[in-house]
Amino acid sequence: MKTRRLLAILAFILSGMLTSCEYEYVIPDVPVIDPTVPIKFSEEIAPIFSNNNNCIACHKTGATSPDLTADRAYNSIVPALINTADAEASQIYWHAHPLSTTHAWKKYKTAEAALLLEWIKQGAKNN
């Protein structure tokens, strides 16, 4: 009798614990980007490919496509790797995204991916 009572109490406690847990995956450090401020390709997007991640170690003139060197990056990715109708579906955004499994070498930092996405949403302008 004591065993049944103990098991019932234990089952009640466990059922409460299992139903109260909720998990949500959150991408850390995603900056809030003001969509009303134009993002400049030459000053903010092109440096993503050459500075921090050094994408141009492989994606340079005469090497792996697309050519992401500063003077050729825009023409290499627009329109081929950009989808302004569905920015998040753009290949240039997802290929080296922090959560991507398609690119093993270099990945964007979370803030860079957010900036790139907003630039695409703004029309992927060559400014």
Image (spheres, rainbow, N blue to C red):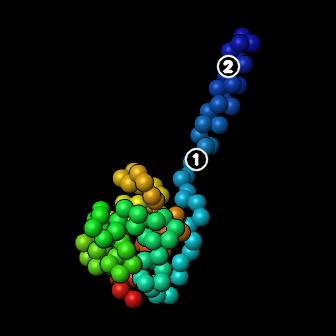
Q: Residue at x 38, y 54 (%)?
A: 103
Inspect this view and state whether residue 86 appears.
Answer: no
Percent coordinates x, y for residue 7 in the rendering: 67, 19
Quadrant position of the C terminus in the picture: bottom left
The alpha-carbon separation of the residues under discs 1 and 2 comes to: 25 Å
Q: Is residue 115 above or below residue 59?
A: below
CB atoms of marks 1 and 2 within 8 Å: no
Quadrant position of the N terminus in the picture: top right
Q: Residue at x 47, y 76 (%)?
A: 47
Instruction: Please name whichever residue, 120 or 96, is drawn nearer the observer in this view of the structure.
Output: 96
Q: Quadrant of residue 83?
A: bottom left
Mark linked to residue 22: 1
Q: Residue at x 65, y 37 (%)?
A: 17
> How many neighbours does mark 2 have within 10 angstroms: few (below 14), some (14-19), or many (20 or more)?
few
Percent coordinates x, y for residue 87 in the rendering: 35, 72
Q: Quadrant of residue 31?
A: bottom right
Mark linked to residue 7: 2
Q: Is residue 106 above or below residue 45?
A: above
Q: Residue furthest left?
A: 80
Percent coordinates x, y for residue 34 in the rendering: 53, 82
Q: Is residue 99 above or below residue 40?
A: above
Q: Which amino acid, mark 1? A: Glu
Q: Secondary structure at mark 1?
A: loop
Q: Secondary structure at mark 2?
A: helix
Q: Which amino acid, mark 2? A: Leu
Q: Quadrant of residue 93?
A: bottom left
